[in-house]
Amino acid sequence: MISFNDATKRLLLHEGAVNHIYTCPAGYKTIGVGRNLETNPLTPKEKEVVGDITKGITVDGAMYLLKNDIKRCEKDLIKNISFWYQLDDERQYALLDMCFNMGIKRLLGFKRMLNAMLIGDYRGAAKECLNSKYARDVGKRAERIARLIETGVWVI
């Protein structure tokens, strides 16, 4: 997996950072760097660290939540993607980004994309990524992730 700092920069590019509660394009209450408060509510420890989110959170608080979200996604991917450790760092990041954006359950619905990745058909996997509601919803982000899946090279 790429470094935490690189993952943070990339997720900030894709998600942005908002230090107050807002409604994301999918209609969920969100805070920080894309933290969906409805499907991924704060843990007691997170509440202790970031405080009363109704008053907003600090940049440090947003980064704390992001770090936890990255760790959660990595654990979900390791548990659910049998070939996770056979992927290079960049393709692991592509799946992490998708998991972060839509959750592991929806990512696992990309059966043709994941099967193509399993056999090393990265061009086919990229096409499957782009042939989805996800791609229609997130536009340039999906194009960037599909390119990363296909080539293994991050390009802004």
Image (tube, grey):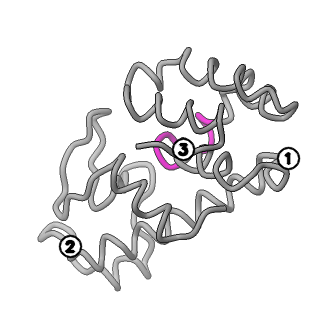
Residue 45 horizontal side relative to residue 60, left or right: right
Residue 123 on the magenta segment: no
The alpha-carbon separation of the residues under discs 3 and 2 comes to 23 Å
Q: Position of residue 45 (x, y in %)?
A: 44, 82
User: Dot 1 surroundings within 10 Å: few (below 14), some, or many (20 or more)?
Assistant: few
Answer few, some or many: residues within 10 Å of disc 2's Cα (few below 14, many 20 plus, some between 14 and 19): many
Q: Residue at x 79, y 51 (%)?
A: 84
Q: Amino acid at mark 3?
A: Gly
**Disc 1 to disc 2, C-alpha distance:** 36 Å
- Identify the residue under disc 3: 103
Secondary structure mostly seen in the magenta stretch: helix
The residue mark sitting in front, 1 or 2, is 1
Q: Is residue 127 above or below residue 60?
A: above
Above or below residue 12? Residue 46 is below
Type of amino acid under label 1: Ser
In space, the residues marked 1 and 3 are separated at their CA atoms by 17 Å
Q: Nearer the viewer, residue 80 or 92?
A: 92
1 or 105: nearer the viewer: 1
Q: Which residue is mark 1?
A: 82
Tell me whether circle 1 and circle 2 mark residues in contact (CB < 8 Å).
no
Query: How many numbered circles does the render carry?
Result: 3
Q: Secondary structure at mark 1?
A: loop
Which residue corresponds to mark 2? 57
Name the quadrant containing residue 150: top right
Q: Disc 2 marks which amino acid? A: Ile
Q: Residue at image x 37%, y 30%?
A: 140
Query: Which quadrant does the N terminus fall into?
Result: bottom right
Q: Position of residue 44 (x, y in %)?
A: 42, 78
Residue 135: % across, % down: 46, 23
Which stretch appears magenta?
A: 100-107
